[in-house]
Image: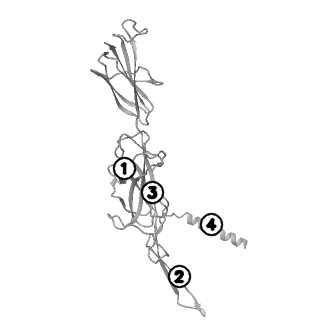
């Protein structure tokens, strides 16, 4: 008996190995397929073979509705105030055993913690949903070749995953690190008619019928999206990364006509050096920073003294930089190409007290 059990166990393991080596598809047999098999019985009477007997059985494969919406990537989408066409990326997979349409809704969370941390504090505008065009343009990235959807995905085939882009505009005048949470929800709809969104699908209740029944098999999505409801959802978010500039202005006396550079005083004829310091405490570089400073009427600008891009040490201007800028009475001006997040830069010039 022991050897027989061991032998049977070996057969079972071999059979399992054979099954495991066979590729499996998530969706399985197509819904509505009729599966038929026939059993036959051969027998003899008095050693004489008699006519074969047979019996058949068939049933219809029911429909399993299963889908998955997933954020693509694991980081927030960085945006700047006033940005248009800010993109969050999702993937929709039809794991059902039938071609289906999928209704799409892009919405925003209200308060609470967003997908990648931070508290939802603002709403984006002008939401649109695009389907990635895998024939033209840049595959996997939103571009002009992608298809603007009218609220649904049409005739998505079995075991197919597609990339979807939720595109929105970011309001102006937002603080650094402000967050907007975004949800994409897909709901299965009847397929079969190209170019038209299918009707809602209802799960079959009660006992199995002879026809094509429907079973919801989807897992729970994000908040409010329960399991087995024929829909699925996931979150992404926009996080504002912007420059936050703080401007300070300081001055020092360089010389006067009597003391020269030794303990000079601010008397007529004294030379004064000004420094406009711009510090960026935000999360993104400030670019094309234009500084303008009108010289007071009691002073005369000293030509050739403008310096740009100087440094600040411990909050104090170093009165240095590279020659540049311009003067058009009474304005001293200069442009700093970029001030990185966490950095500071300066404009320095001199003038004489009248």
Mark 2 residue crowding within 10 angstroms, few (<14) / some (14–19) / many (20+): few
| Residue beneath disc 4 | 13
Q: Position of residue 187 (x, y in %)?
A: 41, 61
**Residue 341 sits in quarter:** top left
| Residue beneath disc 3 | 233
Select label 2 or label 1 by which is in front: 1
**Considering only order in the chain, which callout, 1 or 3, is on the residue closer to the N terminus?**
1
Asked whether 156 or 49 is in front, the reply is 156
Q: CA distance from mark 4 to mark 3?
A: 40 Å
Task: Label 3: state its secondary structure.
Answer: strand
Asked whether the beta carbons under mark 2 and mark 3 sit within 8 Å of each other, the answer is: no
Asked whether the beta carbons under mark 4 and mark 2 sit within 8 Å of each other, the answer is: no
Asked whether 344 or 55 is in front, the reply is 344
Q: Quadrant of the C terminus?
A: top left
For the question of whether residue 10 can be seen, the reply is yes
Task: Label 4: state its secondary structure.
Answer: helix
Q: Residue at x 43, y 20 (%)?
A: 318
| Residue beneath disc 1 | 167
Which residue reaches farthest bottom? 46
**Considering only order in the chain, which callout, 1 or 4, is on the residue closer to the N terminus?**
4
Describe residue 11's horizontal placement relative to residue 91 as left or right. Answer: right
| Residue beneath disc 2 | 39
């Amino acid at each position: 008996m022991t050897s027989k059990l061991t032998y049977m166990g070996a057969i079972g393991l071999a059979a399992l190995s054979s099954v495991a080596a066979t590729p499996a598809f998530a969706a399985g047999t197509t819904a509505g397929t009729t599966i038929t098999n026939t059993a036959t019985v051969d027998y003899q009477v008095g050693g004489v073979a008699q006519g074969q007997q047979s019996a058949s059985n068939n049933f219809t494969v029911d429909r399993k509705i299963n889908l998955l919406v997933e954020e693509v990537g694991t980081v927030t989408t960085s945006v700047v105030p006033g940005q248009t066409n800010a993109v969050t990326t999702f993937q929709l997979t039809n794991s059902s055993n039938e071609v289906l349409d999928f209704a799409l809704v892009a919405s925003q969370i209200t308060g609470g913690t967003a997908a990648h941390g931070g508290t939802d504090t603002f709403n984006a505008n002008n939401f649109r949903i695009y389907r990635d065009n895998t024939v033209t343009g840049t595959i996997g990235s939103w571009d002009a070749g992608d298809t603007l959807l009218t609220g649904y995905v049409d005739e998505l085939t079995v075991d197919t995953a597609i990339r979807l882009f939720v595109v929105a505009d970011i309001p102006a005048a937002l603080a650094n690190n402000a967050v907007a949470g975004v949800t994409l929800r897909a709901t299965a709809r009847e397929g079969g008619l190209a170019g038209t969104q299918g009707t809602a699908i209802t799960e079959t209740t009660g006992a199995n019928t002879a026809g094509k029944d429907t079973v919801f098999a989807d897992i729970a999505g994000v908040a409010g999206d329960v399991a087995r409801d024929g829909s699925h959802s996931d979150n992404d978010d926009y996080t504002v990364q912007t420059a936050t500039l703080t401007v300070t202005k300081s001055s020092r006396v360089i010389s006067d006509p009597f003391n020269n550079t030794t303990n000079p005083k601010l008397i007529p004829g004294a030379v004064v050096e000004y420094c406009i310091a711009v510090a960026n405490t935000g999360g993104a570089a400030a670019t094309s920073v234009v500084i303008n400073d009108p010289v007071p009427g009691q002073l005369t600008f000293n030509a050739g003294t403008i310096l740009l891009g100087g440094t600040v040490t411990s909050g104090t201007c170093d009165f240095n930089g590279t020659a540049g800028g311009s003067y058009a009475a009474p304005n001293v001006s200069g442009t700093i190409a970029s001030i990185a997040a966490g950095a500071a830069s300066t404009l320095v010039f001199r003038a004489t007290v009248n």
